[in-house]
């Protein structure tokens, strides 16, 4: 097993290109199951989660051809409608195959998913929505089994905002008979990107990016070509890294309007941010000020940036309050940050962060994807060496993070853990 080692104290400067968004690519790759032909997707990041979903698609009978960051998927002949435990257990996003399989084949048997340990994240809203579309659902022996001769449009209200739930039901509704209206739908750019892919396939969708999405089902969908949008969380992570190190970093291949909430908080903290086209320049030439943060669904401050921002606030002047409203277990990284010298107190869903003069390198353990990123950021400013174990988490969502960090001046490398 690998570990990442970071030597702190290096100021980050230069240019780094942002990869395609994992959270956009996963549902978009799965959407190929809805078509009878070859779909082509470009700017697909090379990540463990991407490799996992492609293995799952192949197990269902899809033909997958990967050429660098371009993936071609031919789902003309699907040989199976079951997503087995061994392929699903490591990644919660695997549940996204459920609705396309039911819509296309009339049947799906999908193992209950796994993924990062950051909260329960139940799939009940997916199942409730699919039942509203006319499917029968049976859960036994750790599997969800769904059947429907032909899904029928329905009015569906999500009790809470769910990104993967919105995406799953939107894919099902694209091939349903009649009109489906999704209320309290997720508004994330990744949802909009999936809607654009489906419309490229011939789906009739209005309102993506708002809380009410209307889908007029069609008889069939055709193959399409689509470029995966930039990863706003990777971009936000590098923005935080530049701010932490007093750096001057330009991000290319990004989408600044997807980063408004993160940019706003960084600017409140005293960071200078300039955007031009698909580039962002992040400059930090003075002490970081404390800023309070409350995670929210898009377009609010993303929960996927909470851990990284907590590191920044650990090095800020004064005290900040970070409130996590999305996932109940997303402060697992706090104990590891404390090992590095951070002063953080947790009470329920609220963290009180008091800025310290310095962090100090130590061995730490990553608990999930974004916690991994936060520990890398902490290592950038900690005195001495920080060793981050369980880095397989970071490989699920960050493409070549050590190489990209080194490009802008970080002292970071990977070793075999003893």
Image (tube, grey):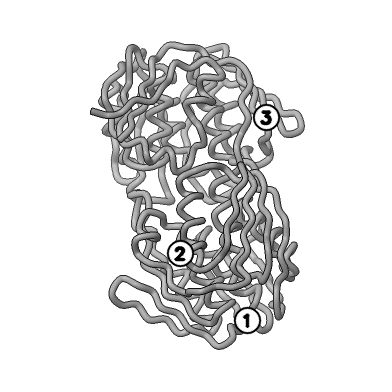
- How far apart marks 3 and 1 lie (CA) works out to 41 Å
Q: Is residue 170 left or right of residue 306?
A: right
Which numbered disc, 3 or 1, marks the residue closer to the eye? 3
Q: Using a 10 Å C-alpha cutoff, classify the residue at mark 3 as few (fewer than 14 neighbours), some (14 to 19) or many (20 or more).
A: many
Q: Is residue 239 left or right of residue 417?
A: right
Residue 36 appears in view: yes
- How far apart marks 3 and 2 lie (CA) works out to 32 Å
- Comes first in the chain, label 3 or label 1: 1
Label 2 sits on residue: 95
> Is the residue under label 1 in contact with that under label 2 (CB below 8 Å)?
no
- How far apart marks 2 and 1 lie (CA) works out to 21 Å
Label 3 sits on residue: 252
- Residue at image location 47% in from the left, 37% down from the top: 293
Check residue 153 in the rendering and tell me which mark sits there, or answer none. Answer: 1
Residue 161 appears in view: no
Q: Position of residue 251 (x, y in %)?
A: 64, 27
For this rendering, which residue is in front, 177 or 351?
A: 177
- Residue at image location 39% in from the left, 74% down from the top: 144
Which numbered disc, 2 or 1, marks the residue closer to the eye? 2
Q: Using a 10 Å C-alpha cutoff, classify the residue at mark 1 as few (fewer than 14 neighbours), some (14 to 19) or many (20 or more).
A: many
> Is the residue under label 1 in contact with that under label 3 (CB below 8 Å)?
no
- Residue at image location 26% in from the left, 33% down from the top: 335
Q: Position of residue 284 (x, y in %)?
A: 57, 16
Q: Position of residue 26 (x, y in %)?
A: 54, 54
- Residue at image location 35% in from the left, 72% down from the top: 143
At numbered mark 3, what does the secondary structure look like: helix, strand or loop? strand
């Amino acid at each position: 097993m690998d570990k990442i080692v970071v030597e702190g104290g290096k100021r980050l400067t230069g240019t780094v290109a942002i990869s395609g968004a994992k959270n956009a690519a996963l549902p978009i790759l799965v959407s190929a199951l809805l078509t009878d032909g070859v779909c082509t997707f470009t700017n697909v990041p090379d990540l463990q989660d991407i490799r996992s979903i492609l293995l799952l698609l192949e197990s269902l009978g899809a033909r997958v051809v990967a050429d660098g960051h371009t993936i071609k998927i031919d789902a003309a002949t699907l040989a199976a409608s079951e997503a087995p435990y061994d392929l699903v257990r490591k990644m919660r996003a695997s549940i996204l195959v459920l609705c396309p399989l039911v819509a296309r084949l009339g049947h799906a048997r999908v193992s209950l998913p796994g993924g990062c340990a950051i909260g329960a994240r139940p799939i009940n809203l997916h199942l409730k929505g699919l039942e509203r579309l006319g499917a029968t659902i049976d859960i036994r022996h750790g599997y969800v089994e769904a059947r429907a001769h032909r899904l029928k449009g329905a009015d569906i209200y999500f009790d809470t905002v769910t990104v993967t739930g919105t995406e799953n039901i939107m894919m099902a509704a694209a091939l349903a008979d009649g009109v489906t209206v999704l209320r309290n739908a997720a508004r994330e750019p990744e949802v909009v990107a999936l809607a654009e892919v489906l419309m490229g396939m011939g789906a009739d969708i209005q309102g993506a990016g708002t809380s009410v999405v209307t889908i007029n089902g069609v008889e069939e969908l055709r193959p399409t070509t689509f470029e995966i949008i930039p990863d706003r969380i990777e971009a936000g992570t590098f923005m935080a890294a530049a701010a932490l190190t007093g750096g001057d970093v330009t991000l290319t291949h990004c989408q600044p309007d997807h980063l408004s909430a993160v940019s706003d908080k960084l600017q409140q903290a005293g960071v200078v941010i300039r955007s031009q086209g698909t580039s962002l320049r992040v400059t930090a030439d003075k002490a970081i000020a404390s800023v309070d943060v409350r995670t929210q669904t898009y377009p609010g401050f993303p929960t996927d940036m909470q851990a990284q921002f907590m590191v920044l606030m650990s090095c800020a002047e004064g005290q900040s309050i970070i409130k996590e409203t999305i996932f109940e277990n997303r402060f697992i990284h706090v104990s590891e940050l404390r090992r590095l010298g951070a002063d953080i107190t947790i009470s329920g869903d609220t963290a009180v962060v008091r800025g310290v003069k310095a962090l100090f390198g130590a061995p730490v353990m990553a608990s999930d994807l974004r916690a991994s990123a936060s520990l890398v950021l902490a290592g950038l400013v900690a005195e001495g060496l920080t060793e981050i174990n369980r880095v397989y988490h970071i490989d699920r969502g960050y493409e070549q993070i050590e190489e990209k960090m080194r490009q802008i001046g970080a002292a970071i490398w990977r070793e075999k853990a003893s």
